[in-house]
């Protein structure tokens, strides 16, 4: 946790990890030690079809979770992974019979949030998403989807085409850690502006969209009418993405940038912000609808 210059408390939270309870290489206790040492305040344990309850491991807050991977390897036949976080009890879903909407409904019924996990990795389309109801969050970046045998970690495209259709979900960055080999753990996370580090307060803040996604850079967004104001830690690029394919002032590049402003055009329906620091680490805002 850190406190910003305005006195706001920010908590470092990971929302997608795996352990030896499914296909991760560390036990829950070993995983918790890794993330605690990396400065995390809370982590969701989201093993495949294995519900993990809310609790605490060696001082690290644990958010309840589970991942429901529907489909196999062939994306032509349909693959979708749905992560549930914050459920009050085990949904007790059966892998052989659970369909996409059933998983989402069960997560929501038990007070949780349904996350569309790594849609680019799964080659999900906007039609796939629009056919379903009840998603709370969408993974903009998924660390493990860039390592080992994977290569599609970034899902900005599907977030943007959905926003073009007036559909937006808060965007989270996650690790989806499996290997714990220095490449997929403690890399991508959200910073949450919560009242405290208790799980209930963190989940409330996520539901209220009081967070941003990051791999390190700090990001603060303020809106004044149709003007978007960005303050950040030092970075080399501040990018205002929107339904516009090109604008002359949309991408700002330089050294040690910490501030930028962007005025939305009349025809722009939404904007979101990405910043990149000198080490190539990103931070992502949520979509801001006009």
Image: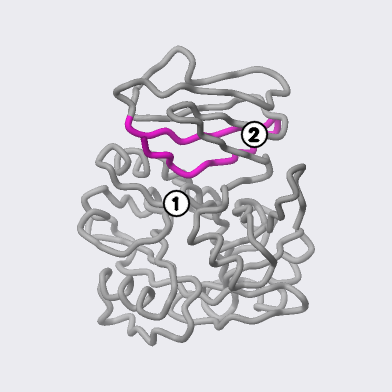
Which mark, by number, is residue 170?
A: 1
The percent coordinates of residue 216 (x first, y second) are: 68, 44
How dense is the environment of label 1, judged by Cα within 10 Å: few (below 14), some, or many (20 and up)? Answer: many
Above or below: residue 42 compared with residue 91: above
Q: Nearer the viewer, mark 1 or mark 2?
A: 1
The percent coordinates of residue 190 (x first, y second) are: 60, 53
Element type at mark 1 = loop
Magenta-highlighted residues: 269-290
**Residue drawn where x is 55% and y is 56% of the image:** 174
Nearer to me, 37 or 171: 171
Q: In whole angstroms, how far apart are the C-alphas of marks 1 and 2?
A: 23 Å
The quarter of the displayed image where residue 181 is located:
bottom right
**Residue drawn where x is 72% and y is 74% of the image:** 30
The answer, for residue 229, to whether it is visible in the render is: yes
The answer, for residue 148, to whether it is visible in the render is: no
The percent coordinates of residue 54 (x first, y second) are: 59, 80
Quadrant of image for the C terminus: top left
**Residue drawn where x is 25% and y is 60% of the image:** 78
Q: Residue furthest top?
A: 248
Element type at mark 2 = loop
As for residue 82 lying within the magenta part, the answer is: no
- In the image, taking residue 9 as reference, residue 136 lies left or right, namely left
Residue position for label 2: 280
As for residue 270 lying within the magenta part, the answer is: yes
């Amino acid at each position: 946790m850190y406190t910003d210059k305005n006195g706001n408390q920010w908590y470092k939270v990971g929302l997608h990890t795996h352990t030896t309870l499914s296909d991760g290489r560390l036990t829950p206790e070993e995983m918790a030690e890794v993330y605690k040492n990396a400065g995390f305040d809370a982590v969701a344990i989201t093993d495949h079809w294995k519900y993990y309850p809310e609790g605490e491991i060696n001082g690290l807050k644990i958010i309840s979770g589970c991942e429901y991977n529907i489909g196999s390897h062939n994306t032509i036949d349909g693959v979708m992974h749905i992560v549930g976080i914050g459920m009050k009890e085990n949904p007790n879903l059966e892998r052989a019979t659970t369909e996409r909407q059933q998983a989402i409904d069960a997560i929501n019924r038990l007070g949780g949030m349904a996350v569309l996990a790594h849609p680019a990795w799964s080659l999900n389309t906007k039609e796939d998403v629009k056919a379903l109801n009840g998603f709370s969050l969408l993974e903009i970046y998924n660390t493990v989807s860039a390592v080992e045998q994977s290569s599609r970690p970034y899902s900005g495209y599907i977030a943007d085409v959905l926003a073009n259709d007036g559909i937006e979900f808060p965007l989270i960055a996650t690790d989806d850690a499996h290997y714990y080999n220095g490449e997929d753990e403690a890399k991508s996370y959200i910073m949450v502006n919560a009242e405290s580090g208790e799980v209930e307060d963190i989940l409330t803040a996520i539901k209220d969209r009081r967070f941003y996604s990051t791999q390190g850079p700090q990001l603060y967004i303020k809106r004044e009418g149709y003007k978007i104001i960005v303050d950040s830690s030092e970075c080399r690029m501040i990018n205002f993405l929107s339904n516009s394919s090109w604008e002359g002032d949309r991408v700002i590049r330089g050294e040690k940038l910490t501030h930028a402003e962007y005025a939305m055009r009349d025809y722009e329906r939404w904007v979101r912000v990405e910043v990149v620091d000198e080490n190539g680490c990103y931070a992502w805002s949520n979509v801001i609808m006009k």
